[in-house]
Image: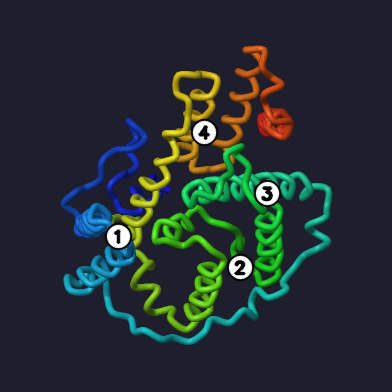
Amino acid sequence: IAMVGMQWSGLVVDKPGTLVGLGDLTAPPVLLSLFGLAVMAVLLTLNIRAAILIGILASLAVGLITGMIHYQGIIGPVPSVAPTLFKLDIAGAISTGMLSIIFIFFFLDMFDTVGTLVGVSQQAGFIREDGSLPRARQALLSDAIGTVVGTLLGTSTVTSYIESSSGISAGARTGFASLITGVLFLLALFLEPLLKMVGGGIEYGEGMRLYPVIAPALIVVGAYMMQNVRHIPWTDFSEAIPAFLTMILMPLTFSITEGIAFGFIAYTALKTVQGKLREVPLLISVFAVLFVLRYIFLMG
């Protein structure tokens, strides 16, 4: 999530020779991102709870004052769902050629969700001492229902997102926070112009769009999530290497699923070499095999 924030801020850009490199620090959107990041960092250092929200509002204000962000109003018409509502092609979805694609999407969505739930729950302190997630069944069920309902509405996937960590960092811990978030999403239907000012982005360069108001929040949330690294036994390489592969491959492949896949495979393989396969939870072993088969299938 920090990598996304760095790209959206313009701090990290594509470079042919080295894949990534430092962006143009003199560019106005990048400077606005740095300003927002500095405000959030200072407020967090001073233990001010609403640091991220204050930083976003401060960046928005500076963007409006400097003309980088243009005022577009507050209230707008509610978008129509008619073009996408119930526009389903069931027959096409159950055709032979689509089944493998559906399975791959299921695989990706499931592990993105699992990775998000574990990451967010660790940040909130919900993970038990044995590493299990309380009420995981209910969490996965609600995510599955959201995915189905979102499909019927024709929206992008309604699922749990790692950006939820920003709410955790602001103090959200109970279902009441989720209810408030849902109400705010409903209100957002009437506030499209305002939301475009906050998260609509700024055109910069050729075909490039930066998001200097919200990008610093993602970077800060990434820093929050790194706190859990201290629990990894770095002197045990059968634990450290899978954990490292998981962490490094998520941003480099831009996929939570790929990071989890390599982590599961490496963990199972190294524990097997150690003669400690029995220590590996059965579910991880099964999914490690499935991930290997998936990569073989993709290579084929």
Q: Earlier in the sequence, mark 4 or mark 3?
A: 3
Whole-angstrom CA distance, mark 2 to mark 4, is 30 Å
Q: Are marks 1 and 3 in contact (CB under 8 Å)?
A: no
Whole-angstrom CA distance, mark 4 to mark 3, is 20 Å
Q: Earlier in the sequence, mark 3 or mark 2?
A: 3
Q: Nearer the viewer, mark 1 or mark 4?
A: 4
Q: Earlier in the sequence, mark 2 or mark 1?
A: 2
Q: Nearer the viewer, mark 4 or mark 3?
A: 4
Neighbours of disc 4 within 10 Å: few (<14), some (14-19), many (20+): many
Secondary structure at badge 2 equals: loop
Whole-angstrom CA distance, mark 2 to mark 1, is 25 Å
The residue where tag 4 is placed is: 246
Q: Is residue 120 left or right of residue 199?
A: right
* Number of marks: 4
Neighbours of disc 3 within 10 Å: few (<14), some (14-19), many (20+): few
The residue where tag 2 is placed is: 155
Residue 281, quarter of the rendered image: top right
Secondary structure at badge 1 equals: loop
The residue where tag 3 is placed is: 105
Whole-angstrom CA distance, mark 1 to mark 4, is 28 Å
Question: x, y (%) of residue 185?
Answer: 51, 74
Marking on residue 212 = 1
Task: Work out whether 162 lies above or below 271.
Answer: below
Secondary structure at badge 3 equals: helix
Q: Earlier in the sequence, mark 1 or mark 4?
A: 1
Residue 288 or residue 7, whichever sits in front:
288
Q: Earlier in the sequence, mark 1 or mark 3?
A: 3
Please name the amino acid that badge 2 sits on: Thr
- Tell me if residue 128 can be seen: yes
Q: Is residue 27 left or right of residue 290?
A: left
Please name the amino acid that badge 3 sits on: Phe
